[in-house]
Structures are given as structure tokens and as C-alpha cells.
Image: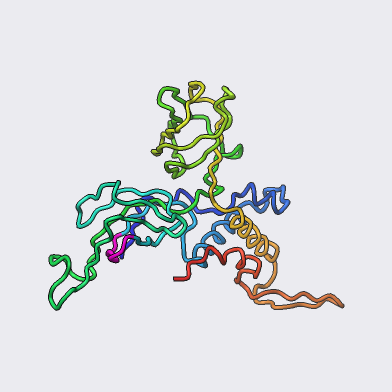
Amino acid sequence: MTVTITTSALQKKLVTLVDLKVALDISVSTYDTFLDSLIDRVSAHFDRHCRRTFARQIVTETFNGNGRTEIHMSHFPMVNLGALSLDAATIATTEYEIWDAAIASVFMENGWVENIPIAIGVTRLPLAQIGDNDYSLIYTSGFLLPSDNITAADSFTDCATNVAAGTFTRTSGKWPLLVDGDKITFGGFTASGLNTDYTVASRTDLVITVDETLTDTEAAGQTVTLICQTLPEDIEEGAIEAINTRFAGRNRDRALKSERIGDFQSTYGAAGLLTDYVTGILSPYKVIF
């Protein structure tokens, strides 16, 4: 099995600086650079600890069949299936489907052909060698993060709409890695009817097409916002807690286990380790195989 990141996550921050400062009740900008670096480090730590990538990305995975109708991909949750091929021959999209997105289970009614010997020197696919990666599947996995939202803090003004096409178009930058079926909420348009919830039909870097009928056409110039987060809120909470622990101890010797001042004594956890509270939050999301 081999995995290639076809389209990397636009960003991997599990909490935004704005939301973090609100949660920590920090109103000054003195610590912004340090806090932003902590967001990056804690987000990367969560990925390593859980042995997964939380941020949404598009991957190409090559693998052998298992002889059954269900097979599991290595990245999850799986939110969209792209092209599937066997020995470079494309398989029709009607032949396979996501069975269980949470565990990246893909179903194929005709079964995933397995290269196994059925007698000495005889295989089910005689031109293939045992261990060959015959299947190649492109799919989208992971969550849309709080940093994928476009809020008042990072809104933009280059989005135009087209009623007939049902599209929202950027003239620069990129939309988050939205897929068919994602729920999104727009705000900031002059026509208030456009500021509502939509279901994504398709997405390119610059164009989002939605299933709903748009109420008006507007040229670029409005201060547009977009809410699209799918990351579970407890992961975001865990990131805030981990960052707060590190931030609160920023001036303490990390090797210090405890200290006493008069009758007051403090005992600190092991340097660099997540607290029990945070590891408890991450436990259901940790890959154990």
C-alpha cells in the first residue's frame, strides 16, 4: 500500500487565533506570534498522537484487494470518492461507494479482487505478482477546520454570485476543500436572501456550486463570510486546553516537577506530555492499528 497526498490541506490549525484569545480571555496582541506558533505545534502534536491527519485533504491510495466486498482505506473520515482504477483501467463509479465514512470503508458489490495463490505457481490474476498494488483510489478525507471558516476577522470582497448557475465565484484565493453534500453558511451579501445555508454540489478552487436556488446575482464587493467547519468541537476544545497549559507555563522551567513557597506547593505534570483531560478527549479519535 502506498499513499500520496494529491491535494494537501490548506491549513492544519485546529483552532484560530481569534477563538483561542477569546477562550483564554486575552485582549492584547503581545502574545499573538507565540500563540500562533503554539497553535501550529499543538495541532501537529494532535496529528502525531492520534496517528492521523485531522485536516481535510485529497489522497491517492494504491492497495491490494482483500477478496471481500468491503475494504478500508488508511485516511478517515472519508467524505468523498474520486476515480478508482484496477491495473490502470478505470472502474465505473456505480461499482463502488462509501459504506462507512467514519472508518473509511468502501463497498464494491463485485468484490475487491485479491492476488492470492490458489495452487503452487497459479494465481487468480496470473499476470500480477503477489503484493502488487493493483487498485488506485482517489478520495477526500478529514475535517474542515475552524481555520477553514471565513469569518469577520478574515473576510474578503472578491466573491460574485450567479443565479442561473447557482454559483459563488472567487476572483482570487481558494475555497476550502468542500465536497458534494457539505453544509455551508454564507454571510455578508447585500441581498439578505443570499445569507443563508446551502448544500454544496461541487467545488473548484474558485467556484462553489450549490444545490439551492440563489435569490439574487451580486457582483464582487461585499464583505463575505463563510462557515463550513466539520471538526468535532471537542477536538477544538482539547487544542485550546493544551495550548493554555503550555501558555500558562511559558515562564517555568519545563524540567521542574514541583516547587514550594512557604506553605504553598505546586506539582507539575511531565514536561511535554498532554494532560489526562486532553488525552481523554483525543482517545476516541486515536488510530490504534
- Which range of residues does the magenta coloring cover? 62-69
- The N terminus: image quadrant: bottom left
Horizontal relation, residue 212 to residue 237: left or right:
left
Residue 212: x and y in percent read: 48, 30
Residue 68 higher or lower than 217, as above or below: below
Instruction: Judge by depth and name the residue closer to the eye, 232 or 190.
Output: 232
Depth order, front residue of 199/195: 199
Seen from the viewer's position, the closer of residues 285 and 53 is 285
Does the segment drawn in magenta span residue 66? yes
Residue extending furthest toward the front: 109
Dividing the picture into quadrants, the one containing residue 186 is top right
255 vs 184, left or right, is right
Residue at image x 22%, y 50%? 90
* In the displayed structure image, the side of residue 81 where residue 288 appears, left or right: right
Q: Is residue 208 magenta?
A: no
Residue 138 lies, in percent from the top left, at 33, 52
Compared with residue 156, is residue 140 higher up or lower down, i.e. above or below? below
Q: Position of residue 208 (x, y in %)?
A: 43, 35
Q: Residue at x 62, y 67 (%)?
A: 280
